[in-house]
């Protein structure tokens, strides 16, 4: 998982009998559930999986040496 806690923006919306949710900053981090509690749990799991997958893909697709470092922005 994360080395440090990071903050993201979760958005929730009721659609019919379901709730949908997504992370504003991370395309593809979205899910649905019947309750807000379940939605929040699913969304955290989706976010962690996407971030972990992106790290694995970066390592696999990059043949030449590369630099990794934290970058900080305020929005």
Image (cartoon, helix red, strand yellow):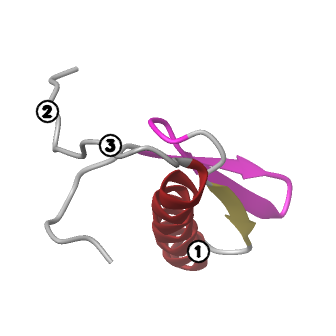
Image: magenta residue range: 10-26
Cα–Cα span, label 1 and label 2: 26 Å
Q: Nearer the viewer, mark 2 or mark 3?
A: 3
Residue marked by disc 3: 66
Q: Are marks 2 and 3 in contact (CB under 8 Å)?
A: no
Disc 2 marks which residue? 72
**Horizontal side, residue 47 vs residue 57: left or right:** left
* Disc 1 target residue: 42
Secondary structure, mark 1, is: helix
Q: In the rendering, at what x and y percent does residue 23 appear? A: 50, 46
Q: Residues within 10 Å of mark 3 (few under 14, many from 20)?
A: few
Give the CA distance from mark 3 to mark 1.
Answer: 32 Å
Q: Secondary structure at mark 2?
A: loop
On screen, residue 17 versus residue 1, left or right, reads right
Query: Crowdedness of circle 2 by 10 Å Cα count: few (<14), some, many (20+)?
Result: few
Residue at (32% x, 43% y) in the render: 66
Secondary structure, magenta segment, majority class: strand
Q: Is residue 21 magenta?
A: yes
């Amino acid at each position: 998982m994360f080395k440090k806690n990071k903050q993201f923006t979760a958005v929730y919306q009721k659609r019919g009998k379901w709730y949908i949710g997504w992370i504003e900053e991370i395309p593809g981090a979205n899910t649905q559930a019947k309750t807000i509690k379940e939605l929040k749990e699913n969304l955290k799991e989706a976010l962690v999986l996407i971030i972990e997958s992106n790290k694995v893909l970066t390592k696999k697709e990059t043949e030449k040496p590369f630099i990794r470092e934290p970058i900080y922005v305020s929005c």
